[in-house]
Structures are given as C-alpha cells and as structure tokens.
Image: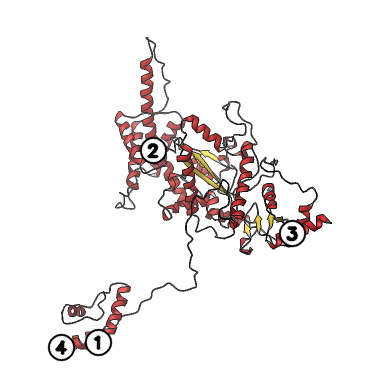
C-alpha cells in the first residue's frame, strides 16, 4: 500500500507539472534521465487505424527534396545494447515505473521521442507538447534535398557551396543529367592537363635518380607500351578548358545560342575513349615540351574559379548513391560515364558489391572481417574519438588543423545547409531534432560535407559511440528541458554556433497584389487649341485643371512615364502656359 500511495503522489505531481513523456524504441539514457527529473512515462501504443505515408508518395517527396521519410533509421534492432558507464540505470525490479505508466495511460504526453518523424503528425499536437522532429526536414536530410537546396546558398549568404560540398547531380532529372555529363567531360579534360604536368615532374625525378646511380650501371629498360596517345589529344583538352574558362567569365554572352562548342557530343565520346586508354589501360600520354607550360597556366587559372579542382583527383571517380537509402546501401564508386548512365537507366548488371570499401560506416563494417594487411595501429572497430584524431594530427605535424581548419569548416557547412532549408522546414516552437553530419577531410584538412542524417543511431555500437551517444542524449535534455527553466544552465558539450533574428512572415489575407490602370482622357483644352481657341484659354486651364492635373501627374509618375501629345508638349514649352498632368 505504501508503494501504491507513493506512486500515486508522484504521478499526481507529474501530471500537474506536465511531466509526462512518451518514447518509441530503446532509449535507456533518455528514460533514466527523465525519470531522474521527476517525469513519468506513458507507454506508446500503436493503433491499427493509423496509416503511415504510402511508399509512392514518400518516393515522390524524396525526389523533390522535402520528404519526411528519414534516410537513416534510428537504432539498429540487431545490435546488442551495452549500457554506457556514465549512468547507473535503475531497473524496474518492483514494477513501480510500470505501475505509474498505467496510471498515466490517458494523460497527455508533453515530451515525445520517436525514431521516425512520420509516427505522429505534429499538426495535431498542442503548442506545449515537445517532440524530437521537425516536419519537412528532408530538404537537408536527404541526398536530393541537400543537393537542391545548397544551390540556393548565394541567396542566403556570401558563400559558395562548391567550397565545402562536393558537386552533386540528380541523374534522374534530365537537366541535372545533362549537366553531369558536361561536368564529366570537363573533369576529364582537366585531368589530362594534370597528368601532363605530373608526368613532367615524374620524368625530372626519374632523370635525377638516374644521374645519382654510380658506375656504368645501365638503367632499366622501360616496358614498351602498346598504345600511345598523340599530343593532339592534349591540345583538345587545353582548348576545352580554355573554352570553359571563357564561359565562366561570361565571355560567351554575345555568342549565338546555336554556336557550336569546341567539341561536339560525338567529339567528346572520342575524347573519352582516348582518356580511358590513358587512365585505365596504361596508354602513353605523349605531349610536347611547349604544352607543359600551357597546361600549368590553364590549371592555375582554373584553380581560381573551380574550388574542387584539387579535391577531385585525376581519375574522374564519382560516388553513385541511391536517392533514398541509408547506411551505405547501394553506394558504388564509378569512373566510366557510360556505365553510370546505364545504371541510371535501370541496368541491374551494372550493380556491384562495393560493401567492403565503406571504411567509415559501422553498419557495413560490423558484417565484415578486418584485412590482415591493415595498419597495426588502426583500432579493431575502425573508429577513433576526436581526441585520438587530434593526437594523430599532432603526430603528423599539424597541431592546429583541428581548431583552425576542421572545426570552423564543419560549423560553416552545417550553418549553410540549414540556411538554405529554413524556408522549407516547417517551423514549430516546441520541436527539436538531433542530426548527424558526415564529413571527409582532404589532404589540406579541409572538411567536405557528404550528407546530413536525421535520427542518427544512439546505440552503443563501439566503445567510442557508447561514450559519445550517452553524452549527446544527456546534453540534449539539458538544452531542450533544463534551459527552458534556466537560461544559464550547463548545456554540456553543445555550443551555439549561429543565431539570427526571427522574421515574422505576414499572414496572407487574400488581398490581390495587382496594379490596374485606366484610360487617360485628353483635357478639353486640347480640343479648343485645335479649333483655334482664344489666347485667354491658358488662364482657364489653371482654374479648371489644377486639381485634375495634379492627380493626373501623380498617377502617371507612379506607373510609367506617359508620352505627351504634340500639342501638350508645345504648350509646355511656353513659360506662361502651365501644363496639366506634368508629374515630378
């Protein structure tokens, strides 16, 4: 009876203070910390009458970039849960929590945590019901949405998405497909220039090594290559890059739309055949000495206008990803344009098993064995903490790269992604959400944003995530619950990196924003002048047309300058004849 009485008192206090929460899935950290704050859990019940969005609509929405279907499903159910060491979880041995949950089964939950945003419709929640999702966040949590919205970045900030987000195209859209084909062509042309410069430096280094060989030792004979590509191929690449530079500088603005490009689609097809011979078949790339300096000059000009010229390498490798899948499923690395286009057209023979190349995806790695040829210092679970990574940077001789390049770059990329999506995501005061951003770092430590996932898994899959995810959940509750009562409370490792004033959008009340005009009739004075009126007529114009003339002039000025009749213009030239309708 004492247990029942205490449970009832606790429930009454929680209901009065609106401390009823509801969780879908296994979140022991969230449950434990909420109960420590005096909250009582209401068990989530799935009603058979509730229907989720159909797959067809979800697919269409994902193509448009505003789907509410998350690409990253929260919590892998097959992962065995290992409690983090940060908390001592209280097990409901005596059934007290189950008893209190039954007492609040008809109460309204004021904190809702679900794995998917389509489980509940936010439109039917009250303003003080908190939920861990925003509606229409697919504008930046889907690959298609992020690709589309970052193109609008110049409208929101003075930044270039190409400086932090790899070039991305929707191959299912005809205009994007055409742009990608052109990009592949030009990337191949730039790669030819890079290979010419690289081969020149390589020949210098080989020559230097041969000069250092003592004695009469004969250098090794190089294997004779069966295929060689002529210097004219390098000239084609140079001309294509020069034309691209001209287009970027808008020097083609006066060209006719029908003006042919330097290379036609058929010409590019032949160009790619030779390019594949050099890149993939080992053909010799012959070039003239005069072409080397020209290649260096063009590449230097391209670096000023193509931010990704060094990041893209010299083999034209592209990551091909399905538009609405997660956790590395269906991702392929491809370097032949024809194969990529066949894959887009639905040729399943182009699909390959590329799981083993996902070196940074634990959802894939946990099903594979580590190679025996891997570096001995790599951890068995292929994951470092940020502290370990910073120590590695210290050993590499780049101790300031983390604080001066990596972290500021990641912050800027996330801010820009949210800036371009703020008009699409449905604004709701009592909503919040956790997102996981994936980055890859270049040789210069510059971070490149790959994607942003909604509802990242909070399961302790490795020793690193066991500590990290528990801390993230604890800090989340500090921000969304504790800070509402105390603005100066501790928010853990969370940091406010951007804030902008709220912009109130005026409510549309159905007013037609349309300008309408009416015909302007000629004053009676014009008729009198044509009929030879007396010279005292101008004085009559002052008296009769003073008000009408003022209104006429104002109306004409507010729309477009109206041409005056010839007689009115001649009358305006007289210093003694004021003209009705003369606007400022």
In this figure, which residue is indicated by the disc labeled 3? 11
Total numbered circles:
4
In this figure, which residue is indicated by the disc labeled 2? 190
Residue in front for this viewpoint, 407 or 496:
496
Nearer the viewer's eye, disc 4 or disc 2?
4
Q: Position of residue 353 (x, y in %)?
A: 59, 37
The quarter of the picture where residue 313 lies is: top left
Under circle 2, the secondary element is helix
Quarter of the picture holding the N terminus = bottom right
Under circle 1, the secondary element is helix
In this figure, which residue is indicated by the disc labeled 4? 535
Spatial separation of the CA atoms under disc 1 and disc 3: 87 Å
Q: Position of residue 237 (x, y in %)?
A: 36, 37
In this figure, which residue is indicated by the disc labeled 1? 524
Q: Earlier in the sequence, mark 4 or mark 1?
A: 1
Mark 4, other Cα within 10 Å: few <14 / some 14–19 / many ≥20? few
Spatial separation of the CA atoms under disc 3 and disc 2: 69 Å
Residue in front for this viewpoint, 313 or 196:
313
Nearer the viewer's eye, disc 4 or disc 1?
4
Disc 3 + disc 2, Cβ < 8 Å: no
Spatial separation of the CA atoms under disc 4 and disc 1: 15 Å
Q: Left or right of 188: which side holds 9?
A: right
Nearer the viewer's eye, disc 1 or disc 2?
1
């Amino acid at each position: 009876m004492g247990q029942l009485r205490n449970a009832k008192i606790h429930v009454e206090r929680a209901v009065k203070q609106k401390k009823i929460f509801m969780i879908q899935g296994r979140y022991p950290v969230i449950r434990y910390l909420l109960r420590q704050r005096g909250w009582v859990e209401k068990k989530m019940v799935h009603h058979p009458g509730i229907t989720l969005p159909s797959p067809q609509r979800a697919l269409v929405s994902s193509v448009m970039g505003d789907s509410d279907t998350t690409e990253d499903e929260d919590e892998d159910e097959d992962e065995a849960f290992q409690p983090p060491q940060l908390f001592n979880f209280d097990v409901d041995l005596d059934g007290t929590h189950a008893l209190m949950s039954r007492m609040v089964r008809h109460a309204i939950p004021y904190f809702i945590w679900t794995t998917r945003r389509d489980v509940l419709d936010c439109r039917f929640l009250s303003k003080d019901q908190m939920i861990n999702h925003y509606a229409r966040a697919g504008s930046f949590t889907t690959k298609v949405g992020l690709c589309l919205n970052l193109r609008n970045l110049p409208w929101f900030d003075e930044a270039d998405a190409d400086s932090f987000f790899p070039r991305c195209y929707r191959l299912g859209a005809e205009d994007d497909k055409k742009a990608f084909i052109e990009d592949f062509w030009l990337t191949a042309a730039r790669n030819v220039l890079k290979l010419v410069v690289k081969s020149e430096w390589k020949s210098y280094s080989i020559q230097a090594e041969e000069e250092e060989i003592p004695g009469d030792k004969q250098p090794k004979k190089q294997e004779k290559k069966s295929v060689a590509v002529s210097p004219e191929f390098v000239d084609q690449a140079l001309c294509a890059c020069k034309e691209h530079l001209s287009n970027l500088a808008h020097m083609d603005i006066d060209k006719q739309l029908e003006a042919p490009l330097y290379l036609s689609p058929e010409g590019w097809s032949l160009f790619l055949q030779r390019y594949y011979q050099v890149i993939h078949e080992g053909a010799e790339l012959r070039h003239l000495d005069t072409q080397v300096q020209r290649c260096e000059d063009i590449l230097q000009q391209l670096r000023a206008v193509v931010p990704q010229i060094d990041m893209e390498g010299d083999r034209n490798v592209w990551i091909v990803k399905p538009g609405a899948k997660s956790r590395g499923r269906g991702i392929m690395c491809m370097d032949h344009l024809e194969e990529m286009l066949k894959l887009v057209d639905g040729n399943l023979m182009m699909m390959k098993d590329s799981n083993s190349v996902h070196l940074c995806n634990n959802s894939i790695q946990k099903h594979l064995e580590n190679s025996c040829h891997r570096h001995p210092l790599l951890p068995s679970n292929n994951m470092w903490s940020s502290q370990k990574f910073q120590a590695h940077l210290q050993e590499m001789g780049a101790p300031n790269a983390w604080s001066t390049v990596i972290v500021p770059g990641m912050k800027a990329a996330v801010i820009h992604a949210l800036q371009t999506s703020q008009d699409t995501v449905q604004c709701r005061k009592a909503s919040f959400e956790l997102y996981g951003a994936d980055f890859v770092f270049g040789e210069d430590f510059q971070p490149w944003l790959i994607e942003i996932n909604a509802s990242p898994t909070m399961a302790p899959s490795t020793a690193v995530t066991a500590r990290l995810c528990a801390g993230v959940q604890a800090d989340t509750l500090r921000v969304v619950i504790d800070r509402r009562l105390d603005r100066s409370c501790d928010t853990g490792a969370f940091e406010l990196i951007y804030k902008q004033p709220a912009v109130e959008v005026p409510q549309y009340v159905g007013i037609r924003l349309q300008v309408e005009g009416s015909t302007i009739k000629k004053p009676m004075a014009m008729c009198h002048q044509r009929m030879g009126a007396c010279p005292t007529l101008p004085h009559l114009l002052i008296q009769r047309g003073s008000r009408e003339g003022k209104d006429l002039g104002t109306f004409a000025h507010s729309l477009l300058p109206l041409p005056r009749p010839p007689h009115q213009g001649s009358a305006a030239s007289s210093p003694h004849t004021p003209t009705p309708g003369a606007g400022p």
